[in-house]
Amino acid sequence: MSGFKNILLTFLLFVSATQLFSQAPKYSNEFLSIGVGARSLAMSNSTVASVNDVTSTYWNPAGIMHISNSMQLGVMHNEYFAGIANYDYGALAARIDEKSAFGFSIYRFGVDNIPNTLELIDNDGNLRYDRIRSFSVADYAFMASYARKSSTYEGLFYGANIKVIRRIAGDFASAVGFGLDFGAQYFYNNWKFGIMGRDITSTFNFWSFNNSQLEEVFLATNNEIPENSLEITLPKFILGASRTFTINDKFEALAEINADLTTDGKRNVLIRTNSISLDPHLGGEINYKKLVFFRLGFGNFQSIPDFDKNDFTFQPNIGLGIKLNRLSLNYALTDIGNQSIALYSNVFSLQFAIDKNSVMN
């Protein structure tokens, strides 16, 4: 009981601490909120309690304790805005022994080949297309994960991420950030419970700007010249519960509900206050002999004001999965129903498992 009280006290301290950072921007490091793995995206990101593969390095580091092989590799590529923006992810997770595991993952969200026309016109007023150069605006994240099985409480698993953020806007600006995530899962019969705390100590991005190329433009347009600054990403907590159902000897089902608790102010979600918002989402899957999977999810619940009434909207997602020996291919059709900018995104992700015995042979 004392352990629960300590966890609750820590949680309340984190929530209270957000009042000290009221100046922190909303949606900081938002590229890390997109999600990874077509399975989770098809289930509307409702996997914090049940995730048990290499994507656990993102969703809940405690989940890497459940990988069924010595090592798993995972990759994903996705495009947004008709291919203008690219989102890439790669990860590995491996068992150290029966009570511990580790993982490593890389994330990149970027827009490439942006024309730089600052030198398009020379000193004589001539258009010089040969002077056009291109640059990229990209966000990177590198995460090292570690998980353990509790020796004290049966069914309890916990883990943490140490992450480094690197954000680049051509030669004009860049940032380096550092943060910490913590996750836990508890299994009881057919029930699974999970909690994920992202940026639990807040993540700090240190921005630096190169104004040598832009100072003249800023002055001519009466814009404020940016200065080196600190950007803070406030904590976010994800709570989840899932249950598995055995339909018969061939079919099995899983249902999960999650709730995102953000501490960066009011968001347009179902439950919101001036300092905290709660965003529920749910998903499920049915599998046939754990070889073929059908998935469905509902999220992004919103109440949108429309003159004298409020319209209730939500975003459905669907997906499929196929497991062939050590190879798993997952697909998700997400952003359905005109609920966001990036409509009808087709997401594919691959996972490959490696066993020590197979490598030695």
Image: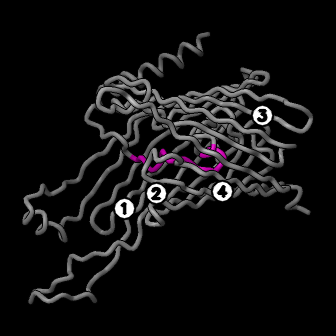
Q: Residues within 10 Å of mark 4 (few under 14, many from 20)?
A: many
Q: Main secondary structure of the magenta part?
A: helix
User: What segment is highlighted magenta in the picture?
Assistant: 29-42
- Picture coordinates of residue 292 (x, y %)? 80, 48
Do residues under tags 4 and 2 come within 8 Å of each other at their CB atoms?
A: no
Locate residue 5 relative to residue 222 in the image: left or right. right
Q: Position of residue 66 (x, y in %)?
A: 75, 39
Q: Quadrant of the N terminus?
A: top right
Q: Earlier in the sequence, mark 1 or mark 3?
A: 1
Q: Earlier in the sequence, mark 2 or mark 1?
A: 2
Amino acid identity at mark 4: Ser
Asked where in the image residue 214 lies, by quadrant, the reply is bottom left
* Circles 2 and 1 in contact, beta carbons < 8 Å: yes
Q: Which residue is mark 4?
A: 349
Q: Determine the residue positioned at 64% across, 35% down.
A: 283
**Vertically, is 170 above or below 107?**
below
Q: Which residue is mark 3?
A: 253
- Residue 30 in the image: above or below residue 255: below
Residue 162, x across and y down, in percent: 52, 44
The residue mark sitting in front, 4 or 2, is 4
Which x, y percent locates residue 86? Answer: 49, 63
Q: Secondary structure at mark 2?
A: strand
Question: Which residue lies under the disc numbered 1?
Answer: 168
Which of the 4 image quarters holds residue 96?
A: top right
**Which residue in the structure is indicated by mark 2?**
140
- Judge whether residue 106 can be spotted in this image: yes
Image point (71%, 50%), residue name: 320
Looking at the rendered structure, the kind of residue marked 2 is Tyr
Horizontal side of 65 relative to 232 (left or right) equals right
Tell me the mark number nearer the camera, choosing from 4 and 1.
Answer: 4
Sequence-wise, the earlier of marks 4 and 2 is: 2
Q: CA distance from mark 4 to mark 2?
A: 19 Å
